[in-house]
Amino acid sequence: MGLVRLKIREMAAEKGWTLKEVSERSGVIYNTVKSYARRSEIATIDFISLQKLARTFDVMIEDLVEIVEE
């Protein structure tokens, strides 16, 4: 099973947004955004949340995800 990291903090910083703002703009629950942003390795991700976050940052999903381990 591969592990990934979401680049939420970096992308939020580029936009000048807090994680709370990311949550509000994307419709993804704040605790989920915070959890994804804090974790350096994630094995499972809610795909709908991932789509919402990518849409919010106006990037492709591939740009939001960093593969940590394949």
Image (cartoon, rainbow, N blue to C red):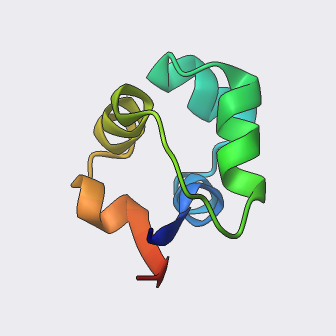
Q: Nearer the viewer, residue 56 or 37?
A: 37
Image quadrant in which the C terminus is located: bottom left
Closer to the camera in the image, 38 or 45: 45
Image vertical order of residue 62 relative to residue 50, above or below = below
Number of labels in the image equals 0
Determine whether, in the image, residue 49 is placed left or right of residue 19.
left
- Rendered residue at 40%/64% (across/down): 65
The outermost residue toward the left is 60
Q: Is residue 17 above or below residue 64?
A: above
Residue located 70% across and 69% down the image: 40
Q: Position of residue 12 (x, y in %)?
A: 59, 52
Q: Position of residue 47 (x, y in %)?
A: 35, 35
Residue reaching furthest bottom?
A: 69
Q: Residue 48, located in which quarter of the rendered image?
A: top left
- The image shows residue 20 at horizontal and vertical percentages of 73, 29
Task: Please tell me which residue lies in front, 9 or 40.
Answer: 40
Which residue is pictured at 64% across the width and 19% down the height? 29
Where residue 21 appears, x then y in whole percent?
Answer: 65, 29
